[in-house]
Image (cartoon, rainbow, N blue to C red):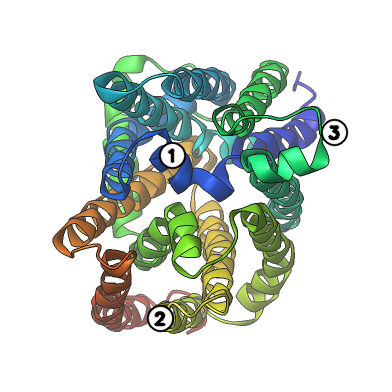
């Protein structure tokens, strides 16, 4: 008798919101810098994070397909709890211990993301009724992205306000004050509570049946290699992943250093949370637009649109106009939602249930490897340029990434055009 999986859908939405909408995101870069790290050290930590995902992404996806998606989600939630503990302890540390705890935080974060990547969507997708499952997934994907956006709005506003001691003390009675080192820990403590919620939610999930569940662990590597070969030989999956990683790596790198960019363009720190909330609102709007455009136009047309919009955004970032520099930043972030919807739609449509989590993990591995390599290159750029006057290194690095992105995506789009036409994949 088939288990009742209807509750998985709401649990998937709740988990997705609490796992992804984290209150420290609007101050992520300056959080580590205020702990005592330099900007290039912080960017290097993101490379450590990406390498960790590179090592665990696909094995975790294959494990999800064999021992079960629910177990991987419980593990992801537990690791989220540990990574937040590392940040809390790091805020009382310095020197080598500070760096060690920050590295441990990035490693736990990477493994956690690897465990959740693919397993969450695969569990939700296979929990949907088989009849009209593709259409139902499009609706659920748009719905969960909207709920994530609401979560981001709340988390970003709270994170920005709670991190700034001046705003907190303005809201408190005059005889009560909160020092900066305490205020900087509050967003981390809030995410620690979110991790507890994630553990509880994932524990209550039910495992849907899928083709190779319960297979022997020694078959895991064979499953990984077979699935990876399928991903890299299927024209649609190959094109959407390769072009997707080119866009994702450069935009996500900017997203991790956005608070440093905000300081460069003289945006007050107390507004960072509200900017993150605006980003969340864009995420509420974009999935509906992405859904309509993906239904109306070909995959290549949608990827071309994403690349052109991203290039325009990167170009307009370069002058770093005071305050007005926010416009291209928000525009770039909106492309992440469009890209995420497009990639997820194609992969779920093409993949079989038996390999769904592994396919998503292969995508995650490639995306995070690209992000890690670009973060490494960007940190080298930052270290190469002198940072005098303040922000000089960041200004020059933003400039150099434009011709790099333009050249790479031009070559990839030319290749994708030939690849999709030669195999007659869909409407071109």
Is tag 2's residue or tag 3's residue first in the polypeptide sequence?
Answer: 3
Query: Image point 48% across, 27% down: which residue?
Result: 64
Among the 4 quarters of the image, the one containing residue 207: top right
Given the current orientation, which residue lies at the most extreme right position?
A: 173
Q: Is residue 409 above or below residue 95?
A: below
Task: Say which residue label 3 marks.
Answer: 173
Q: Residue at x 39, y 67 (%)?
A: 247
Q: Secondary structure at mark 3?
A: loop
From this view, report whether residue 380 is shown above or below residue 65.
below
Helix, strand or loop status at disc 1: helix
Say whether residue 79 is left or right of residue 319.
right
- Residue 287, numbered circle: none
* Quadrant where the N terminus is found in the figure: top right
Instruction: Tell us which disc is closer to us: 3 or 1.
Output: 3
Task: State the image quarter where residue 189 is shown.
Answer: top right
Q: Which residue has dot 1 on it?
A: 34
> Vertically, is 8 above or below 412?
above
Q: Are marks 2 and 3 in contact (CB under 8 Å)?
A: no
Mark sitting on residue 311: 2
Residue 128 seen anywhere in this rendered image of the structure: no
Tell me where residue 65 appears, x and y as whole percent: 47, 28
């Amino acid at each position: 008798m088939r288990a009742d999986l209807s509750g998985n859908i709401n649990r998937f939405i709740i988990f997705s919101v609490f796992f992804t909408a984290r209150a420290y995101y609007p101050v992520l870069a300056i959080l580590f810098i205020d702990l005592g790290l330099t900007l290039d050290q912080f960017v290097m930590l993101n490379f450590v994070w990406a390498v960790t995902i590179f090592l665990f992404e696909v094995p975790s996806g294959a494990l999800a397909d064999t021992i079960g998606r629910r177990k991987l989600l419980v593990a992801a939630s537990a690791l989220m709890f540990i990574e937040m503990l590392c940040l809390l302890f790091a805020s009382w540390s310095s020197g080598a211990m500070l760096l060690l705890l920050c590295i441990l935080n990035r490693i736990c974060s990477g493994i956690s993301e690897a465990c959740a990547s693919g397993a969450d969507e695969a569990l939700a997708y296979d929990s949907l009724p088989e009849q009209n499952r593709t259409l139902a997934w499009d609706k659920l994907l748009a719905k969960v992205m909207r709920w994530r956006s609401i979560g981001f709005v709340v988390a970003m506003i709270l994170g920005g306000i709670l991190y700034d001691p001046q705003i907190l003390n303005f809201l408190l009675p005059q005889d009560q004050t909160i020092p900066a080192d305490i205020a900087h820990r509050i967003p981390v403590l809030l995410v620690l509570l979110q991790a507890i919620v994630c553990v509880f939610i994932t524990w209550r999930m039910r495992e849907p049946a899928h083709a190779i569940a319960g297979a022997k662990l020694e078959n895991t590597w064979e499953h990984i290699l077979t699935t990876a070969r399928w991903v890299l030989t299927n024209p649609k999956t190959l094109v959407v992943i390769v072009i997707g990683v080119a866009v994702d790596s450069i935009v996500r790198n900017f997203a991790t250093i956005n608070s440093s960019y905000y300081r460069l363009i003289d945006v007050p720190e107390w507004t960072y949370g509200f900017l993150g909330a605006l980003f969340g609102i864009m995420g509420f709007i974009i999935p509906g637009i992405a859904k309509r455009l993906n239904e109306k136009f070909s995959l290549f047309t949608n990827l071309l649109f994403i690349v052109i919009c991203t290039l325009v955004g990167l170009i307009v970032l370069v002058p770093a106009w005071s305050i007005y520099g926010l416009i291209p930043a928000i525009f770039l972030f909106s492309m992440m939602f469009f890209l995420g919807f497009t990639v997820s739609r194609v992969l779920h449509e093409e993949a079989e249930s038996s390999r769904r989590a592994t396919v998503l993990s292969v995508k995650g591995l490639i995306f995070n490897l690209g992000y890690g390599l670009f973060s490494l290159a960007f940190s080298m750029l930052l270290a190469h340029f002198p940072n005098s006057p303040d922000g000089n290194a960041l200004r020059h690095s933003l400039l150099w990434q434009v011709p790099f992105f333009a050249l790479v995506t031009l070559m990839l789009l030319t290749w994708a055009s030939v690849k999709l036409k030669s195999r007659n994949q869909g409407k071109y």
